[in-house]
Amino acid sequence: MLSARDVPKRFFPEAVVWATYVLNRIPTLFIKDMNPKKAWSGVKPLVKHFRVFGCEAYVHVSYTQRRKLDNNNSRFVLLGLCEESKAYKLYDTKSKKTMIRRDDNFKETKG
């Protein structure tokens, strides 16, 4: 996952957490017609929030934080979901910082 999307190796723990999260919500051969999450809690999990790990995310930059001719969005890399809220964990490649955001646009296809 890291090499496919050119994500730095220091984000290996985030990749493991995301892979575990996805594997617990998809069907397995060991449990017939169920996934591990449903077998454990009895509730069918939602998967509409799934995104491709390492895909590009574009975050809106508010008018107060930019100048007149600056772009109104900034490019980030998706690192997974936040554990505390229903938001995504994003990495800014320019400032080398991570942030938690919810309202983003994703470009999941490479190219």
Image (tube, rainbow, N blue to C red):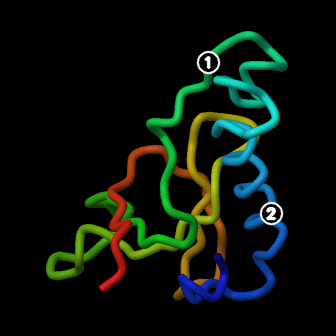
Q: Quadrant of residue 56?
A: bottom left
Which residue is at a point 48% across and 73% down the rendered structure image? 76
Which residue is at a point 78% across and 30% down the rendered structure image? 36
Which label sits on residue 86?
Answer: none
Which residue is at a point 63% across and 56% down the rendered structure image? 80
Residue marked by disc 1:
44
**Where residue 106 sits in the image (x, y, percent)?**
36, 61
The amino acid beneath tag 2 is Val
Which label sits on residue 16?
Answer: 2
Q: Is residue 12 above or below residue 83?
A: below
Q: Quadrant of the N terminus?
A: bottom right
**Where residue 42 sits in the image (x, y, percent)?**
74, 10
For the residue pair 1 and 28, the one nearer the viewer reads as: 28
**Where residue 34 sits in the image (x, y, percent)?**
68, 24
Quick check: 32 left or right of 108? right
**Where residue 27 sits in the image (x, y, percent)?**
65, 36
Label 1 SS: loop
Quick check: 5 left or right of 31? left
Q: Quadrant of the C terminus?
A: bottom left
Q: Quadrant of residue 32?
A: top right
Q: Is residue 65 visible?
A: no
The amino acid beneath tag 1 is Lys
